Image (tube, grey):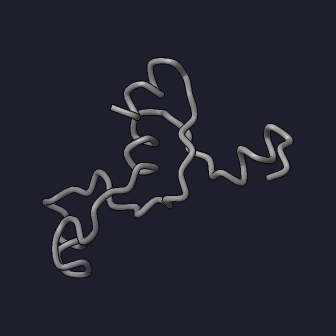
Amino acid sequence: MLIAIASQYNYQIVTFERESGQFGYDVNNEWNWKHNGGPIRHEPKIPDIAKHFGVSCITLFDLEEKLKLCI
């Protein structure tokens, strides 16, 4: 729901999670099975899914810099 709201209102998501690169794997891709043991080894993270839906993610440090805050 967080990503849907961010997409609807053109918000950015603040998170310290990093992309896992595990979203959108092709389960029929032989390379994934040989090298990763299957289509997905780790759960996709918020940035992976947000990127898929065109939502950008920033860290708290990025937000702090953007708003010129000193925390």
Q: Residue at x 80, y 37 (%)?
A: 67
18 on left or right of 70: left
The residue at the far top in this view is 9
Where's residue 34, x and y in %? Answer: 19, 81
- Labels in figure, total: 0
Where's residue 69, x and y in %? Answer: 83, 44
The residue at the far front in this view is 71
User: Picture quarter containing residue 12?
Assistant: top right
Residue 6 vertical position relative to residue 21 in the rendered view, above or below: above
Q: Residue at x 29, y 51 (%)?
A: 24
User: Picture quarter containing residue 22?
Assistant: bottom left
66 on left or right of 38: right
Between 10 and 69, the one lying in front of the other is 69
Residue 60 vertical position relative to residue 10 in the rendered view, above or below: below
48 on left or right of 9: left
Q: Residue at x 24, y 73 (%)?
A: 31
Between 68 and 50, the one lying in front of the other is 68
Residue 27 vertical position relative to residue 48 in the rendered view, above or below: below
| Quadrant, the N terminus | top left
Q: Residue at x 57, y 44 (%)?
A: 14
